[in-house]
Amino acid sequence: MGFIRKSRWMLLALLLSLVPASSFAGVLISVGIAPPVLPVYEQPPCPQPGWMWTPGYWAYGDDGYYWVPGAWVPAPYTGALWTPPYWGWSGGLYVFHGGYWGPHVGYYGGVNYGFGFMGVGFVGGMWRGHDFVYNTAVVRVNNVYVHNTYVDRTVVERNTIVNEHRVAYSGGPGGINHQPLPEERNAMHEQHMGATPVQQQHMQAARSDKSFYANNNGGHPQTMAAERPMGYNSAKPQQQNSYNNNHGAPSRPTYQQQQQQQHQQQYQQQHGSYEQPHGNSQQPHNESRPAPQQHEQSHAQPQHEEKQPKDHK
């Protein structure tokens, strides 16, 4: 057993040694148990212009896997696109790769999260100048407040990876087999920024609530998606977390601009500019459950033991 554990560490160390130093960020979580399947849920409508969809995912905490609900969040800056986190397979372990913001969507393991994140890139909308335009072929918007929309089903079909069993990880036994495309490789090596304070607070709220843990909900959390991030201090004093209890969105005039300026100022104070290598804000650890291994994280090309033709159409 000790030899196997030592071999895994040596393999992970070797993989990390091949990654440029600028790509290191945060703590990477590796677990010996596969994450649960992705639950089926309905997307709440986008509450106001300029907000971006961040799909729900399984994270790992003190009591095992817990669900971080999908949520609409303010874009940290004009042109920002979110690459969602995902679980990959390396050295006999399930390895967590954190999400990040950047000018293009990078590789997220081919995991089909739905609502624009169909396995390759993001087809739920695009930036046109200073405005984000939503593709209502795959995302929902509040038509009272969001008017920049279009419909394009062709791009959805081209970038969808079939995932009938809703597998939540890439590579390994039973995992999704999709190697990074050239455009995904390029995006992975661009300069990024990590999750915003709003996203971090949302994740921490889920981690501290035992009802989100798979051990307590059987892989079916009660709250799967939120109109706004949990704990978010919006203009609405009684904002709700579940799409079943949505209230009207606050009016736009200066709200979005204030949020973008706040995120940019916070990040610039810490890093000098938002165009910096991103960090992984999620650093869960486990003591009572089988302990995950931790080491420096990279967003370079993940390593898979199995290389099979991708199921991609």
Image (tube, grey):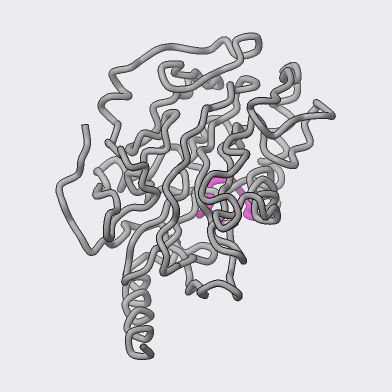
Asked if one can make out residue 100 in the rendered structure from this viewpoint, the answer is no
Q: Nearer the viewer, residue 201 or 132?
A: 201
**Image position, residue 112 (x, y; %):** 37, 38
Residue occupying the far bottom of the picture: 2
Is 125 on the left or on the right of 71, as rendered?
left
Residue drawn 79% across and 36% down?
233
Magenta stretch: residue 110 in it? no
Residue at (27% x, 24% y) in the render: 157
Q: Is residue 292 left or right of residue 90?
A: right
Residue furthest out toward the left: 309
103 to 286, vertically: above or below: above
Quarter occupied by residue 305: bottom left
Is residue 53 at least partly visible in the picture? yes
Q: Relative to residue 185, is residue 84 drawn left or right?
A: right
Identify the image quadrant of the N terminus. bottom left
The dominant secondary structure in magenta is loop
**Residue 30: x percent and y percent?**
45, 67
Q: Which residues are magenta?
A: 271-280
Which residue lies most toward the right here? 237
Placement of the C terminus among the 4 image quadrants:
top left
Residue in front for this viewpoint, 160 or 77 = 160
